Amino acid sequence: MRSFIHQRTSRTRFLICALLAFVLAGIAVSATAGLYPPAAPPGSAFVRVFNGTTQPKISAQIGDKNIGDTAALEASPYIFLAPGTYPAKIGSASSNLPLQGSKCYTAALEQSGVHLFEQDCFNSQLKALVSMFNLVDGTTLSLKTADGSQAVVENVAANASGHREVNPVKASLAVYNGSTKLADAKPVTLERGKTFSLFVTGSASQPVLIWSVN
């Protein structure tokens, strides 16, 4: 009799423990689903906004997606969209943005309007990606080591961008216009699997350098 009661008690405990584990797993899945955004479908286009103006904040709407406010001289997080051409309202400027699948875009708002930069999306977990966006008219910029001895990203024309995958390292870099050093960038630790975007704005005589990390 005692054996029967013991077995029944053990089965009851097992069923309670199994039910509790199932409930906790459901709670964990629900919490995770609320914490992370849904994954982008294969072949999506990715786009972010850079506020290259002195406006303290700008709002942005691309297609039916609201990016929210982006502070002056900062970049927003990326959003994803299906490939296509989308009407965009960024700050007070309006534009149509053609977006290709599996590409990454930066829609930079300047005083003259919206400029769209296109690049291949970065997926390596072994390297870091260094990108430079040249928003200074009349220049061809290179990103080099601070002493100018080694180029990281070379000969980026105005309103263009350049990119290079590099090994993770702590780097002190500077921007050059030809052989003329314009300014030192803030030292940065380049980490595996991350993109480090250097936006160069202002003018050749008074450049402004801003790092953005994704």
Image (cartoon, rainbow, N blue to C red):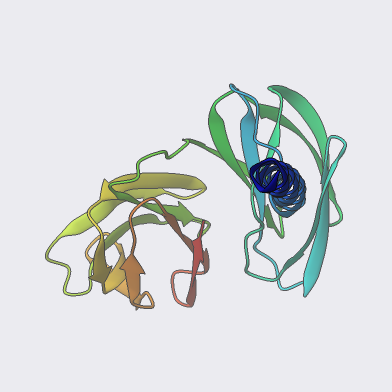
Above or below residue 181? Residue 2 is above
Q: Where is the N terminus found, in terms of image quarters? A: top right
Residue at point 48%, 78% (across, down): 206
- Residue 80, quarter of the rendered image: top right
Counting from the top left corner in percent of width and height, residue 210 is at: 50, 70
Depth check: give the residue in front, 165 or 126: 126
Residue farthest to the front, as pictured: 1
Asked if one can make out residue 72 in the rendered structure from this viewpoint, the answer is: yes
Residue farthest to the left, as pictured: 149
Counting from the top left corner in percent of width and height, residue 159 is at: 52, 48
Depth check: give the residue in front, 105 or 141: 105
Residue at point 22%, 74% (across, down): 146
Counting from the top left corner in percent of width and height, residue 145 is at: 21, 68
Number of labels in the image equals: 0
Relative placement, left or right, of 147 versus 188 is left
- Residue 148, quarter of the rendered image: bottom left
Counting from the top left corner in percent of width and height, residue 123 is at: 41, 38
Asked if one can make out residue 90 in the rendered structure from this viewpoint, the answer is: no
Relative placement, left or right, of 39 versus 177 is right
Above or below residue 131? Residue 57 is below
Relative placement, left or right, of 117 versus 115 is left
Depth check: give the residue in front, 102 or 54: 102
Residue at point 33%, 70% (across, down): 189
Relative placement, left or right, of 60 versus 82 is right
